[in-house]
Amino acid sequence: MTSVLNVDEIAAKDGTSPVALTKQSAAKLFALYDMRGTTLGADTAGQTFNASSFTDNGSASLSTSLTSSMSDAEFPAITTAHFDGTGDIYSRFAGSGNHTSSSFETNSQYANGSTDATGNFYHLAIFGDLA
């Protein structure tokens, strides 16, 4: 016999905290950035999760602050960028000196080495344990 569980909300034992994900590898942050305009905050598009703010550092560098911090500054990240018709774009997670458990930096550039790849969409996901 099959069972069906229909619920509107699932909470931790205390009744208010979110349920912890255990033995799973769900993304702890994901975001889609639209950097085509002159003001990043107005141009941020798409769905985001656990991102509290974005800062355009110039020269295709973007800082992201997390709503809920990670357990430490060493967490895995995946970042990609859309092709905008002018060249292949590479997006990367900046080195450990550029991030903490509550913020991090990503950079992007065209395949030809130009770092002014700001007129594009960028995608990011991070994994690991929340604090």
Image (tube, helix red, strand yellow):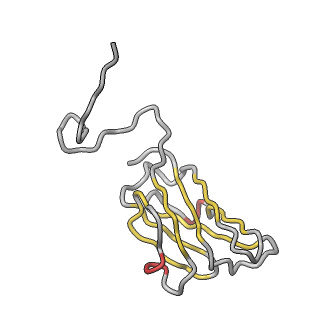
Q: Based on the displayed image, in which of its 4 quarters is residue 113 positioned?
A: bottom right
Q: In this view, does 108 lie to the left or right of 45?
A: right
Q: Which residue is drawn at 70% across and 69% down?
A: 83
Q: Residue furthest right?
A: 112
Where does residue 115 sit, x and y in percent of width and height? 71, 78
Vertical relation: 9 (above or below) 72: above
Q: Residue at x 50, y 39 (%)?
A: 25
Q: Residue furthest bottom?
A: 38
Q: Residue at x 62, y 74 (%)?
A: 120
Q: Based on the displayed image, in which of its 4 quarters is residue 58 positioned?
A: bottom right
Vertical relation: 59 (above or below) 62: below
Front-most of 108 and 84?
A: 84
Q: Which residue is drawn at 57% across and 66% down?
A: 98
Q: Residue furthest front?
A: 1
Q: Is residue 119 left or right of residue 14?
A: right
Where does residue 24 sit, x and y in percent of width and height? 47, 35
